[in-house]
Amino acid sequence: MTASTPIRSLDQLVQDLRDRPSRRLAVAAGHDPNTIAAAGRAAAEGIADVTLVGDAARIAVLCAGHGIDPGVFTVVDEPDTVQAGRRAVALVRAGLADVLMKGLIATSDYMKQILDKEVGLLPEGRVLTHVTVFELPEFVLRHGKLLFGADVAIIPLPDVAAKLQILEYCLDAARSFGIAEPRAALIAATEKVSPKMPATTEAAAIRDLAGARFPGAIVDGPLALDVAISPEACAIKGVESPVGGAADILVFPNIESGNVFYKAATLLAGARLAAAVVGTSAPCVLTSRADDEESKFLSIALGCRLAR
């Protein structure tokens, strides 16, 4: 893909990755049924060279159960899940893997190792966040594109400095999909700036900083969700915004709004999605226990796309 032909669907993302050199994926505690299925598909599709760090005997049984040739994986035998996590992170730190993925390891242990100041993956001064790419049927029908959003899972109440980094990560992700001039909406309940609503004052502050900090991007806020994505809402409300009705990116004011949007998109609107933890030295796939195999696979694809 080039800047003139942006990726407009998650299937297109996978197809584009098939035409590129494979990235290297390290799975922490890879003896997990759903993760093995998704990782096996990524290997079969040719988008990732997969190393499973985990219990080799259980991996062999799971591969047989899923009809996967275990030869598609490199297996590092480590039955202890915490140690498997450490060894997978070490592969990324050593430059032997481009993307990290959570397998059958507790989220708290997975995140603890990513955040470890001595041997983790978060550079000093950076914040960790969770970027999601949504493929919403109605949004695709009306706009013909994907929608990026953050943060829905990591930072409860990001301040202005954290939101600026979140915005940066989202812009980088959108550009990696070939969007030359991404439009980002700083979401709030209203377009009016009010000291009684911190989300609006913070959005205005970020908007004023964004021009100099993020050249080539179009950032505006505060914007209500309808105004951000609906030209009709802009016309009815008389809102004039360079982002209004055309947002590629939604930056949420807090985790509650982002998480509700995420779950409403999937459970009520039939969205397909891919997600990755970023801010780290390599993308980290952190999927929910409720995510199906397809979401895990698409999240691997996103991690491979974002890997540098």
Image (cartoon, grey):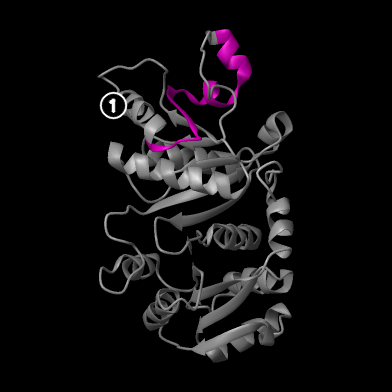
Question: Can residue 151 be seen from the camera position used here?
Answer: no
Pointer 1: what residue?
A: 198
Q: Is residue 111 above or below residue 50?
A: above
Is 230 covered by the magenta stretch?
A: yes
Please name the amino acid that badge 1 sits on: Pro
Residue in front for this viewpoint, 221 or 35: 221
Query: Callout 1: few (<14), some (14-19), or many (20+) C-alpha neighbours within 10 Å?
Result: some
Magenta stretch bounds? 213-236
Q: Residue at x 25, y 19 (%)?
A: 195
List x then y, in percent, for residue 184.
49, 33
Q: Can you say whether 297 is above or below 104 in the image?
A: above
* Relative horizontal placement of residue 254, taking residue 32 as reference (left or right): left
9 and 20: which one is in front? 20
| Numbered circles on residues, count | 1
Please provide percent x and percent y for residue 90.
40, 79
In the rendered image, residue 64, in percent from the top left (x then y), is placed at: 69, 85
In this orientation, does residue 241 appear?
Answer: yes
Looking at the picture, does residue 126 appear above or below residue 293? Answer: above
Q: Residue at x 73, y 63 (%)?
A: 19
Q: Residue at x 55, y 80 (%)?
A: 51
The quadrant in which residue 188 appears is top left
